[in-house]
Structures are given as structure tokens and as C-alpha cells.
């Protein structure tokens, strides 16, 4: 077992030295430092690519479904009564309506901004910014 650990250590050390370009006589600490600098430089290059693939935050609708649907399914599977059937139905219903509410609020804000811009244009006052 100790031989295997030693071989993994030597292999890792050799791999780090070849990747970083550190001479063979340097310490492991210097090799790890050079590897950290190399990874930090690569992070700046790779970060924009990975940022585009980052998952979005869960929506309120998704959270409501994630809570209500498994609860209802577990109640059905276990054979328990459904005293919370109204709560589950309401939660699913609100979850389905939430995107419409968000769109209506965004539309209302855009309309209010357009009215404010038209008012500023009418009185000849430039937009703040």
C-alpha cells in the first residue's frame, strides 16, 4: 500500500512538473505554486465560456411545483387523506399564473417608463442618467 501511495505521489509530482515547466530539482511547494498560477491564468480564459453554460436560478413557478407535486404524490402513494388538497391545488394554480403576473408587471413598468419619457420630452427636460 505504501508503494502505491509513493508511486501516485511521484506520478503527480512529475505531471505537475511537466505541465508547469518547473525544473526537476525544485520543491513540491514551488511546483504547486506554479500550478496555481497556471490555473488562475487559465480561469480567466475559460470563465466566459463556462459562464454562458451556467444554469439559471430556479423560478418561483419551478419552486412551487417542486414543493407541491411531490407532496401530493406522496400523499397519494401512502394512502393518507388529502386534507391539504386545496393547498396543493392552490400552489399549482398560483405557480401556473406567476409567469403571467411577472409579464404583466414588466409590461406595466415599461409603459410607466414610456409615459415618463414622453413627459420629459414634452417639457424639454433631459432624461436623468
Image: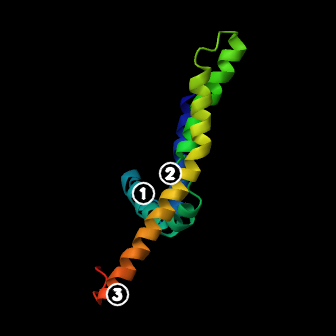
Q: Check whether the beta carbons of the residues at disc 3 and disc 1 lie within 8 A of each other.
A: no
Mark 3 and mark 1: Cα distance apart in space? 67 Å
Residue that label 3 marks: 122
| Badge 1 density bin: few <14, some 14–19, many ≥20, Cα 10 Å | many
Q: Find numbered disc 3 in the image and state the secondary structure of the residue it sits on.
A: helix
Q: Nearer the viewer, residue 70 or 10?
A: 70
Q: Check whether the beta carbons of the residues at disc 1 and disc 2 lie within 8 A of each other.
A: yes
Q: Find numbered disc 2 in the image and state the secondary structure of the residue it sits on.
A: helix
Q: Position of residue 64 (x, y in %)?
A: 56, 36
From the viewer's perspective, is residue 12 above or below residue 24? above
Q: Residue at x 28, y 79 (%)?
A: 128
| Badge 2 density bin: few <14, some 14–19, many ≥20, Cα 10 Å | some
Of pointers 1 and 2, the one earlier in the residue sequence: 2
For the N terminus, the image quarter is top right
Q: Residue furthest bottom?
A: 124
Q: Position of residue 35 (x, y in %)?
A: 45, 59
Q: Nearer the viewer, residue 66 or 20?
A: 66
Q: Find numbered disc 1 in the image and state the secondary structure of the residue it sits on.
A: helix
Q: Mark 2 or mark 3, which is nearer to you?
A: 3
Say if residue 72 shows up in the picture. yes
Q: Residue at x 46, y 69 (%)?
A: 110
Q: Position of residue 83 (x, y in %)?
A: 59, 14
Of pointers 3 and 1, the one earlier in the residue sequence: 1
Residue that label 1 marks: 31
For the C terminus, the image quarter is bottom left
Q: Position of residue 48 (x, y in %)?
A: 52, 67
Q: Is residue 43 left or right of residue 70?
A: left
Residue that label 2 marks: 13
Amino acid at each position: 500500500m505504501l508503494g502505491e501511495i509513493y508511486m501516485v505521489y511521484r506520478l503527480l509530482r512529475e505531471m505537475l512538473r511537466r505541465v508547469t515547466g518547473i525544473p526537476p530539482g525544485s520543491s513540491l511547494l514551488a511546483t504547486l505554486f506554479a500550478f496555481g498560477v497556471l490555473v488562475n491564468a487559465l480561469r480567466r480564459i475559460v470563465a466566459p465560456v463556462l459562464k454562458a453554460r451556467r444554469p439559471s436560478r430556479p423560478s418561483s413557478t419551478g419552486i412551487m411545483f417542486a414543493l407541491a407535486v411531490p407532496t401530493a404524490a406522496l400523499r397519494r402513494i401512502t394512502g393518507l387523506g388529502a386534507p391539504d388538497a386545496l393547498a396543493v391545488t392552490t400552489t399549482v394554480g398560483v405557480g401556473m399564473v406567476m409567469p403571467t403576473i411577472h409579464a404583466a408587471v414588466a409590461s406595466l413598468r415599461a409603459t410607466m417608463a414610456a409615459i415618463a419619457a414622453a413627459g420629459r420630452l414634452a417639457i424639454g427636460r433631459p432624461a436623468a442618467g
